[in-house]
Amino acid sequence: MSKVGRCPEKDVHDTVKNSSMKSVGDVETSVQNDAAFEGRTMRFIDFRILPLLALLYSFALIDRINLGAARTAGMGADLKLNIGARFSIATCLYFVPYILFQLPGTLVLRKLGVRNCLTGCVVGWGAVQFGMGFVPTWGYLALCRILLGVFEAAFFPALIFIISTWYRRHEVQKRLAIFYLISITIGGFSPILAYLFSLLNGRQGIAGWSWIFIIEGAITVFLGCLCFFFVPDFPDKNTFLTAEQTAMVLKRIEDDRGDSVPDKVTFRKVLTHLSDWTLWAYGIMFMCVTLPAYALAYFISIILNDMGWSKTQALLLSAPPYGPAIATAIFFAWLSDKTKHRSGFILVQATMCMIGLILTAFAKQNSVRYFGTFLTNAGNSGCVPGILAYASNNVVSQSKRSVQTALTVSLGGVGGIIASTVYREQDRPRYLPGLGVTIGGQVLMLITLAATNIHFQRLNRLSREGKLSKPLEGQPGFFYTL
């Protein structure tokens, strides 16, 4: 008996259907494979870039802020820093070259090479820090602080610039938060390290405070040597990814904001970027947020000592306030990237910081004042990566990003100058004028944040309505992050 024949149209339909199902399945598998490949690559980049840069910056922080701990450990008496404003002058002078050399240092980063620039910075300031252990008078200390500012000037903006070029706009705050928090966590142990090193007092005829600078300087020089071999470069120049991985990273950046390939830096272009008032606004906000950070870094052990705790207790109690900052900053960074929103979370954290400052300034009980330092750090530490991400998200082109990063961080140095001058000897033990200025800085930051937010909201609305003559930041499809 013959078989019943199949309809030719039915055969064609089944063939097309099977082919389509196979095609869809192949696409889904390809997408899944691409996502897995992308995920593995970005995790590798995270582990390759963030810990090393954070470790390097942590010692920049330690070498920058250990002046207060060294003073508490005996340097103040030996170098007579309690006369007039000597301590404030030595602290403040660091920031003059630190501010002046940031923009030129960042602009030549690509030309001179990341490895050469960063290695030179780290070894240079490590050597200066080592030399600070042998200064005979406060004048030589001030000179070393100036040299420290010269070598550290381009370092932090270079790190922020490098990190921001590797990630999409709404991935960057988590990475900046992780980088910054690893740094301040290690830096938070600076008072404890200072206390341990000071126990070497008298060894080889060297004072305990001198050992703080000598040992930390030697460690920094060693890290500078490691930097030469392991520091990561920009995505388009990296040597640790495969060609396929590099192409994927560059495509992600190009799709996100269109600046994976660096544009040429010219003097005219730099002036054009500097004429954008929002870049100055980011700098003002960063200046305000660095005020409490520097104030606590330089003066917390001194304030605690004036509260009645012994030298040893003051040094050891200076570290715990940095603990809660880790959890709060990571939480707000994750939430900010997830929601693709910045300003609202900066507002919440700045409010926390202000409450902490008010408690430290005006509470009667020392235990409450000490709790205020926890709250200040918990709010302030998250604002730092928040503002850096807010600024980074709203510029396009690598030349503008380099100018914005350098300008933002250099104005942050102005916050350091203010912090080092408003906490005066005659205001001990409560430092009310200094704390008042720091609280006022947080208010100014929130006013500036509101101004930029309203400005960006308006431009986003006009762009969506087609009422602008050209795309935002010259990039079609770009909208500002609020």
Image (cartoon, grey):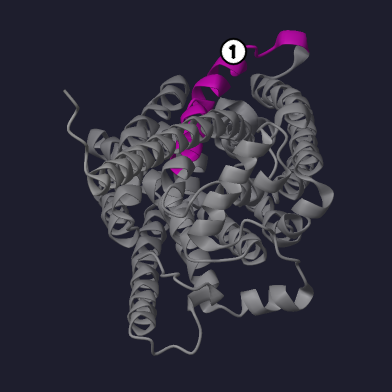
**Closest to the observer, 167 or 180:** 167
Badge 1 is on which residue? 199
Q: Check the image and name the residue furthest to the front.
A: 1
Q: In which quarter of the image is the N terminus?
A: top left
Instruction: Judge whether residue 367 is colored magenta.
Output: no
Residue 266's place in the image compared with 125, above or below, is below
Residue 74 rendering spot, x and y as whole percentages? 60, 27
Residue 450's place in the image compared with 463, above or below, is above
Residue 205's place in the image compared with 131, above or below, is above
Task: Give the residues drawn in magenta, as a range.
Answer: 177-204
Q: Which amino acid does label 1 sit on?
A: Leu
Q: Check the image and name the residue furthest to the top.
A: 203
Q: Residues within 10 Å of mark 1 (few under 14, many from 20)?
A: some
Residue 155 rendering spot, x and y as whole percentages? 68, 46
**Closest to the observer, 459 or 280:** 459
Q: Residue at x 46, y 25 (%)?
A: 315
Q: Which residue is drawn at 73% across and 34% down?
A: 239
Q: Quadrant of the C terminus?
A: bottom left
Residue 259 rendering spot, x and y as whole percentages? 60, 61
User: Count of labels shown?
Assistant: 1
Q: Residue at x 61, y 80 (%)?
A: 275
Is residue 75 among what the camera can see? yes
**Closest to the observer, 271 or 48:** 48
